Image (cartoon, grey):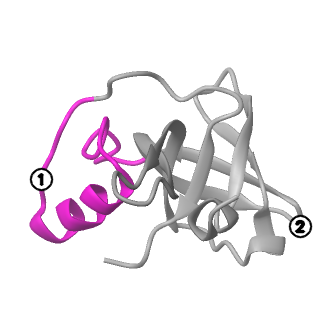
Amino acid sequence: MSNREASIDGRIIKLQPNGYYVGTGGLALDLKIGQRVVVFELGEEILDPDSGESLGRLEEVKSTLITHHVQAKLVQLRADDGADSHVGKVLSAVMADINAGHRGRRATPVQVGDFFRALPPD
């Protein structure tokens, strides 16, 4: 497992009928109410063409969510007003877009098993 994969904060574990999502982590991950998280799925493993060394797996961004309620080991997440702004991009591109203010469209919906990571404050 690469250092990047080791830093994954949590996973989506339930989709609520009210449109909210339940994720692992909560206070155990130092999440705060109103904090933005990026939701992604792991894509293909990328190898260095010269050395053959694994550079890690692409992180295909699905959405951005906001923490709504934080418990000891759980977090409830809701859609972000700009939730579709980074869909289909790798995380490094998302970070660049956050600073540039770009918008996009959701390629695939958030599903149980997707990963999430807290984003730095704007």
Q: Classify 114 as above or below 32.
A: above
SS under mark 2:
loop
- Report the side of 61 relative to 74 (left or right): left
- Please give the residue where the numbered disc 2 appears in the rendered image: 72
Q: Residue at x 44, y 49 (%)?
A: 47
The one nearer the camera, 52 or 23, is 52
The one nearer the camera, 94 or 36, is 94
- Report the side of 8 relative to 53 (left or right): right
Q: Classify 62 as above or below 7.
A: above
SS under mark 1:
loop
- Report the side of 77 relative to 73 (left or right): left
In magenta, the rendered stretch is 80-105
Q: Is residue 83 magenta?
A: yes
Q: For residue 102, which numbered disc appears in the image? A: 1
Q: Residue furthest front?
A: 50
Q: Residue at x 67, y 72 (%)?
A: 31
Residue type of the residue flagged with mark 2: Ala
The one nearer the camera, 15 or 60, is 60
Mark before the other along the chain sequence, 2 or 1: 2
